Image (tube, rainbow, N blue to C red):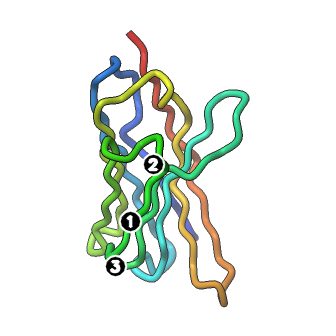
Amino acid sequence: QVQLVESGGGLVQPGGSLRLSCAASGFTFSMYTMNWYRQAPGKERELVARITRFGGSTNYADSVKGRFTISRDNAKNTVYLQMNSLKPEDTAVYYCNAVGSMASGLNYWGQGTQVSVSS
């Protein structure tokens, strides 16, 4: 059974930090590109950060560059999102996403974790 379980969300003041974790099970984690998406109320889901299978390449949305860092530990089947200098506009539900090879077409989602940035 495939599972992606996010944790680490919560309420933080502007300028603060949070570290999200996504624990994966039920599939070969190291063979999947991992993404963090977010969706704010009334807005479309957007890609925040991406990391390739062995962490050799990362990509970020312009809005989070220099503040967020994505990383992964294939031995622990976990992907992380370190979020620093948080802003109110970072408030959203953050989702973990696993994408397999193009040939497989496999794509898995977590249930999401709420991040709220407010004073």
Image quadrant in which the N terminus is located: bottom right
The local crowd at label 2, few if under 14, some if 14 to 19, many if 20 or more residues have their Cα within 10 Å, is many
* Residue to which mark 3 is pinned: 54
Residue displayed at 31% across by 61% down: 71
Indicate whether 4 appears above or below 99.
above
Could you tell me which secondary element the residue under label 3 belongs to?
A: loop
> Where is residue 20, by image quadrant?
top left
Q: Who is closer to the viewer here, 49 or 116?
A: 49
Q: Where is residue 99 in the image (x, y as percent from the top left)?
A: 57, 72
Mark 1, secondary structure of its residue: strand
Percent from the top left, x then y, of residue 73? 28, 68
The quarter holding residue 19 reads: top left
CB within 8 Å, label 3 to label 1: no
Residue type at mark 1 is: Thr
- Quick check: 109 left or right of 36? right
Residue 39 place in picture, x, y as percent: 62, 39
Say few, some or many: other residues with alpha carbon within 10 Å of mark 3 (under 14 / 14 to 19 / 20 or more).
some
User: For the residue marked with disc 2, what is the amino acid?
Assistant: Glu
Q: Residue at x 32, y 65 (%)?
A: 72
Amino acid under label 3? Phe
Q: In this view, does 55 lie above or below 94?
A: below
User: How much space separates mark 3 and mark 1, taking CA atoms?
Assistant: 10 Å
Looking at the rendering, in which quadrant would you find the C terminus? top left
Query: Residue at coordinates 34% horizontally, 19% vertically from top-left?
Result: 14
Residue of label 1? 58
Q: Residue at x 45, y 83 (%)?
A: 31
In primary-sequence order, the first of circles 2 and 3 is 2
Of badges 3 and 1, nearer the viewer stands: 1
Q: Nearer the viewer, mark 2 or mark 1?
A: 1
Is 35 or 60 nearer to us in this picture? 60
In this figure, which residue is indicated by the disc labeled 2? 6
- Disc 2, SS: strand
